[in-house]
């Protein structure tokens, strides 16, 4: 099998992922649908598949694969369309060695291309705090985050530090200084990289994923001590996101962590990707929670089941329930009703929005970002407490509890 030929085909067909596995033809995911290339490539034998995959790995990556049976990496390939980068997962499965290639575009999309809402765009202007993007794998969280990081890069003289597994988008420095670190190459894990980050004079920190207690603890501490921290969590709505973060900690610490999260959280964005009604491309719908005083009180007191009520009550502040975002796109004929119902967490609420005769597109939560939003608007959530200063002993104590 000719791997460059396959990847060039994937680029030309605007695929998001390429699947390689023994005993079947390579497959492309295009606009969310996965289809095998039966006409272009015959099924691969286990030997052919293994040879193609191992051919892109360094010796140390092959050793890691043999030890752990799976590995994540970034990979670039010179193609007729130009140099193309991929995020790759290699793993052992029943029939042999397999791999999934996620294509990473060269250019970081603009807020307009992502139909980004104003309230999300404003996160890039915050001086500190924690902003979380949630959703299933493949819903565009990394792309939306890359857009925000690039906006900071264009407009602010700051130090941006990213810790990723692996590095996806690469940034050309504009006004900001940018440091990108990849797990397995530049650091052994998110937690040690975050410990080191607090000594590397960052203004903005991007943590690829908050996976474990220590990473979450360090991200909260970084947010609390004057840094703007962006990260992702694999959850499907805002209340589940808060509960996931709190539940990682032992019961004796959870009350303190709730107070800490309530003080540093700036917003939670839950994102889904849906096929466009036109049949070409996909579009994001987003649930947006902003950390208003009422939301902070709910988090602090453990009333996360009431967060959805804040979404519906906070439309004028820039919040937006997922179902309202979906309904707006159905009304605009950007997506179909069936596609919206398949992604809605509350289908009944979605149907109520669609049936409403007073439906309005004028609420701030649906207003799209404009370039001047980040520069001219007052900072949202400006009631954040001042950043906490660490003592010398706390800076040197890597095991400090929150």
Image: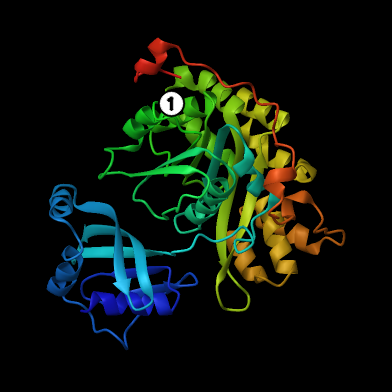
Q: What element carries label 1?
A: loop
The answer to whether 137 appears left or right of 341 in the picture is left
Instruction: Please tell me whether residue 27 is drawn above or below residue 238 in the rendered image.
Output: below
- What is the count of numbered marks? 1
Residue drawn where x is 67% and y is 46% of the image: 374
Residue drawn where x is 43% and y is 26% of the image: 249
Residue 51: which quarter of the image?
A: bottom left
Query: Which residue is at the front of the view, 245 or 60?
Result: 60
Mark 1 crowd level (few <14, some 14–19, many ≥20, 10 Å Cα): some
Query: Which residue is at the front of the view, 69 or 115?
Result: 115
Residue 248: which quarter of the image?
A: top left
Q: Position of residue 91 (x, y in %)?
A: 23, 58
Instruction: Please tell me whether residue 181 is drawn above or below residue 39 in the rendered image.
Output: above
Q: Position of residue 237 (x, y in %)?
A: 58, 46
Mark 1 = which residue? 249
Q: Quadrant of the N terminus?
A: bottom left
């Amino acid at each position: 099998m000719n791997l460059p030929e396959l990847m060039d085909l994937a680029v030309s067909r605007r695929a998001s992922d390429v699947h390689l596995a023994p005993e079947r033809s390579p497959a492309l995911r295009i606009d969310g649908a996965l289809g095998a290339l039966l006409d272009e490539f015959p099924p691969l034998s286990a030997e052919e598949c293994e040879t193609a995959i191992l051919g892109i790995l360094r010796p140390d990556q092959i050793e890691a694969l043999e030890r752990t049976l799976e590995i994540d990496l970034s990979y670039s390939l010179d193609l007729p369309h130009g140099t193309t980068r991929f995020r790759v997962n290699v793993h052992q499965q029943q029939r042999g060695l397999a791999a999934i290639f996620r294509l990473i575009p060269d250019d970081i999309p603009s807020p307009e291309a992502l139909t980004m809402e104003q309230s999300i765009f404003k996160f890039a202007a915050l001086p500190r705090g924690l902003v979380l993007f949630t959703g299933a794998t493949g819903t565009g969280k990394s792309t939306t985050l890359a857009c925000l990081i690039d906006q900071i890069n264009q407009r602010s003289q700051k130090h941006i530090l990213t810790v990723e597994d692996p590095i996806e988008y690469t940034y050309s420095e504009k006004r900001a200084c940018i440091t990108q670190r990849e797990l397995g190459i530049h650091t052994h894990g998110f937690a040690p990289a975050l410990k080191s980050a607090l000594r590397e004079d960052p203004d903005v920190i991007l943590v690829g994923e908050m996976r474990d207690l220590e990473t979450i603890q360090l991200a909260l501490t970084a947010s609390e001590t004057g840094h703007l921290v962006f990260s992702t969590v694999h959850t499907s709505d805002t209340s589940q996101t808060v509960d996931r973060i709190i539940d990682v900690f032992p019961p004796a610490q959870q009350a303190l962590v709730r107070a800490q999260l309530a003080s540093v959280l700036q917003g939670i964005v839950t994102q889904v990707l849906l096929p466009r009604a036109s049949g070409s491309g996909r579009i994001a719908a987003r649930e947006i929670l902003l950390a208003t005083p009422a939301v902070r009180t709910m988090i602090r007191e453990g009333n996360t089941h009431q967060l959805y009520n804040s979404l519906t009550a906070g439309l004028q502040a820039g919040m937006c329930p997922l179902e309202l975002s979906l309904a707006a796109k159905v009304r605009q004929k950007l997506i179909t009703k069936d596609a919206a119902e398949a992604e809605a967490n509350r289908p009944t609420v979605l149907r109520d929005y669609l049936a409403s005769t007073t439906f309005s597109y004028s609420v701030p939560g649906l207003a799209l970002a404009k370039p001047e939003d980040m520069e001219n608007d007052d900072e949202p959530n400006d009631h954040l407490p001042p950043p906490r200063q660490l003592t010398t002993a706390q800076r040197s104590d890597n095991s400090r509890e929150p």
